[in-house]
Image: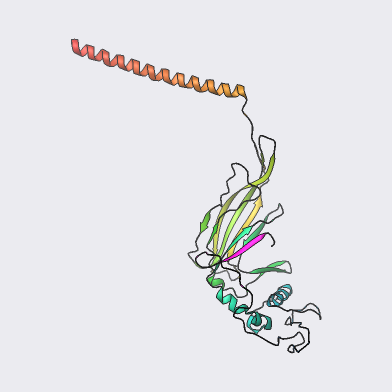
Amino acid sequence: RHDIIKKRLDHLGNVIESRSDGIGGPKIDRPLQRHGGRLDHNETYCGSCYGAEMSDDECCNSCEEVRETYRKKGWALTNPEMIDQCKREGFIEKVKEEAGEGCNMEGFLEVNKVAGSFHFAPAKSFYQSNIHLFDLLAVQTENSNISHRINKLSFGQKFPGAVNPLDGVEWTQQASSGMYQYFIKVVPTIYKDIRGRKINSNQFSVTEHFRSADGYTQSLPGVFFFYDFSPIKVSFTEENVSLLHFMTNICAIVGGIFTVSGIIDAFVYHGQRAIKKKMEIGKFG
């Protein structure tokens, strides 16, 4: 979370400036309290969690806190317009204003060296009973456009000669919404330069697949990357060519040039003699 930078983009790809929360939201002078009544003067605000609180003294003072408690419970928050905090912060209005927007993400994350996945999706994820679930509140999955461009994707440090097959890849959605999946095979790689400096990095190959949301009611729109590590490790070592080896190559090149030149010279010489002989026979005949 801390090493990922997210930027909101308009439909032209321009970065949208950040704005304060609550734009467009109705002003509520007396917010709803946890005990069910409205906020009175000189009373400390403690918002209701609408049944999802874990303890009697837990408060939900923002729309995000209410959504988080619902996620922890594994409940679906389907009526944000009935949540006092969401109404006060203009949550629904902000979601509507974001229609047609895109996003740009950059950064890095650390993963274990085992098979796994990461994804980009318009939802927040949580776990319940060891099942990976998604909060799709205010996301119309049938209207989600997952067209995307990957400017750069790598596993590990860059080293000389490295080629990342997904750099600059672009895909445009033509059909209905769905999941775009990249299946990546990561090959651990060690690069050792001429000074002995060692770079531990990775190379990878990839296959792509698009799964339409048609017929999959639980399909989450987004771009998914599934990676697995190869049991084989590749090692590159940079070395200097010895002087003897260099001289041998020079001699081989010179000898090759001399041999080819001799063949060409013999071909031209014998060809010229044959032509001259035919001309002489024709002249005296």
Considering depth in this image, is 3 or 71 the residue closer to the camera? 3
In percent of width and height, residue 163 lies at 57, 46
Residue 192 location, x and y as percent? Answer: 67, 38
Residue drawn at 34 percent across, 18 percent down: 268
Residue found 66% across the figure and 82% down from its top? 88
Residue segment shown in magenta: 1-23
Decide if residue 276 is on the left or right side of residue 72: left
Q: Is residue 216 magenta?
A: no
Residue in the foreground of this view, choosing between 209 and 190: 190
Q: Is residue 68 left or right of residue 23?
A: right
Query: Was residue 8 drawn as part of the magenta stretch in this picture?
Result: yes
Does residue 246 show up? Answer: yes
Would you identify the image quadrant in which residue 162 lies? top right
Residue appearing at x 65%, y 58% in the figure: 117
Q: Position of residue 258 (x, y in %)?
A: 46, 19
Rendering quarter of residue 129: bottom right
Question: Can the viewer see residue 79 in this picture?
Answer: no
Is 182 situated above or below 9? above
Q: How is the image coloured?
A: rainbow
Apparent side of residue 235 relative to residue 212 in the rendered image (left or right): right
In the orientation shown, which residue stands out farthest toward the top? Answer: 284
Q: Quadrant of residue 81?
A: bottom right
Image height of 19 relative to 154, above or below: below
Q: Main secondary structure of the magenta part?
A: loop
Which quadrant is the C terminus positioned in?
A: top left
Q: Nearer the viewer, residue 276 or 156?
A: 156
Which residue reaches farthest right? 56
How many discs appear? 0
